[in-house]
Image (cartoon, helix red, strand yellow):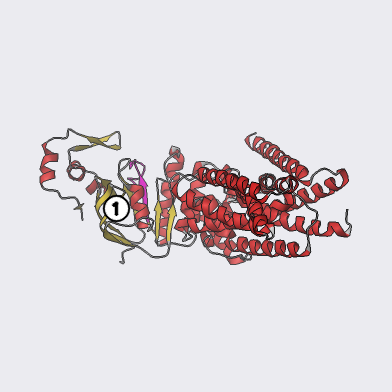
Amino acid sequence: MSTTVALDRVGVRLGERSVLREVSFALQPAQFCALIGPNGSGKTTLLRAILGFIPLSSGRIDAPTAGIGYVPQKISIDPGLPLRARDIVALGLDGARFGMRLPSKTRAAQVEEMLRAVGAAEFADQRSGALSGGQQQRVLLAHALVRRPKLLLLDEPLANLDVGSTADIVALLRRLARDYGTAVLLSAHDMNPLLPAVDRIVYLANGCAVSGKAEDVVRTEVLSRLYGYHVDVLRVHGRVVVVAGERDETRIALERDPIHTVTVP
Amino acid sequence: MFAPFMLHAWIVATLVAISAGSVGFFVVARRASFAAHALPLGAFPGAAAASLLGVNELWGLAGFAVLGVLAIDQLQRAGRREVASALWLTGALALGMLLLSLSGRYAESVYGLLFGNLLGIDAAELALVGGCSVVMLVLLAVIARPLLLDSLSRELAAAAGARPSALELLFLGVLGIAAAIAVPVVGALLVFSLMVGPGSAARAFTNHPWSALALTVGISLLTIWSAIALAYVSNWPVGFFVGVAGILCYVVGRWRGGAAALAHSL
């Protein structure tokens, strides 16, 4: 099976700050992967680096040159903008191209099919800025997927969604990844709604990443090594919580022997 | 009202309404109202510069509009958009005062530039305005779709492969041309109302982006035509009626938008 995106020891500096130091992982087609990490760990930076928006200071990224779908963080659609949900999806088809275009049946059919696939057909003609957060996420998802990209990146798509919408969007992404063979990487600071659905997780902390199956990554010893000091992975009432322990001699030992990337097969 | 000496006025006003209306749709969509105010007003000193050099004032206006576009674009790369527009506006007006005092222009012609003057447009000026309108409309048609995507979200436009900084520069260029041809007609102080009023009214009546654009141009034409007719009948300045119509457009749009939102929430 061919690899959709591969990161090899990626480092990114923003100004003076080294945000990512050594991040390596790869995604296969149709894989549904969560990018997890505490606030400020560089999740958005990593996604923007894959998109080619920011230069790398070290390492390399092999990503599909054309055809990365992207849903950025916290888009607030101006409620005054005369733009239907349908128009946003159509802009996903050819919004970056110059020139005028006559309406075409094939394009309208592509847009309609995509709207149905994300469950947005019933509000397709409403003003997008007036839709709820969950509905807007579906429309933006359709915008990103309508060209059938090989890779789909979503930045905190579950933030500000209620519990029901969160579950719906996760299930939808799970299904679309399989149906379209798209590798999906979505960032979140809370892994709990995602753990039952994802194939893999990439855990980002301390400028480095661990990737693998959730049960292999979300473990006390693996995450402690990644953070560089002792953390506890606790399972409480069916939820996983990562709690920082004392910054004890584990950290000092790790500083003498800095192994940044732990790859779990 | 339709006497031969008014014919040029009607044609120029129509061209100005079409160009200001179509760019106005994007001014409102991109929340660039302040730039739409700063560019025409900042272009006005160009007319003084032109009379110092002894050339047609349209060239001076266009030259200063271009300078304004480049200045605002450069300044907003470094900082905030409103600050960029404000800096350009202040600088241009200061320079304008100096140029006006050097050129010794009559207060009357300055008054015409600030508040608009439709009479005395000759055939050469008409051709110049026509040429500028065509160039502006073609440019706008070419960038319309990426510009709409960029108005929705800069990040989405960049991810789709558009270059938002280039789009912003082209948009300011289109805005600059529209400003340069509108200033002598409606006046530097009131061009703003023609660019913002119809655009903000049209968005309350339709959810379809290109229908909203067409409706903006329609309202803009209606505004300027009725302003000329009323000015002709009452002998009051055209700019007064354009300004009042701009505010009316905005109020109607708000009222209609408010009513729609209320109906939606019930």
> Residue B263's spot in the image, x, y percent?
67, 36
> Residue A53's spot in the image, x, y percent?
39, 56
Q: Determine the image quadrant of residue A3.
A: bottom left
> A184 or A225: nearer the eye?
A225
Disc 1 element = strand
Tell me which chain the residue with mark 1 is part of: A
Q: What span is in magenta?
A: A184-196
Q: Is residue A183 visible?
A: yes
Q: Quadrant of the C terminus of chain A?
A: bottom left
Q: Main secondary structure of the magenta part?
A: loop
Q: How many marks?
A: 1
> A196 or A153: nearer the eye?
A153
For label 1, the crowd category at 10 Å Cα-Cα, with few meaning under 14, some 14 to 19 and many 20 or more, is: many
Q: Quadrant of the N terminus of chain A?
A: bottom left
Q: Is residue B37 visible?
A: no
In magenta stretch: residue A193 = yes
> Residue A148's spot in the image, x, y percent?
46, 62
Q: Determine the image quadrant of residue A9.
A: bottom left
> A85 or A113: nearer the eye?
A85
B89 relative position to B133: left or right: left
Q: Residue at x 61, y 65 (%)?
A: A101
A174 relative position to B175: left or right: left
Q: Residue at x 60, y 45 (%)?
A: B93
Residue placed under numbered mark 1 in the picture:
A12
In magenta stretch: residue B18 = no
Say above or below: A31 vs A246: below
A56 relative position to B88: left or right: left
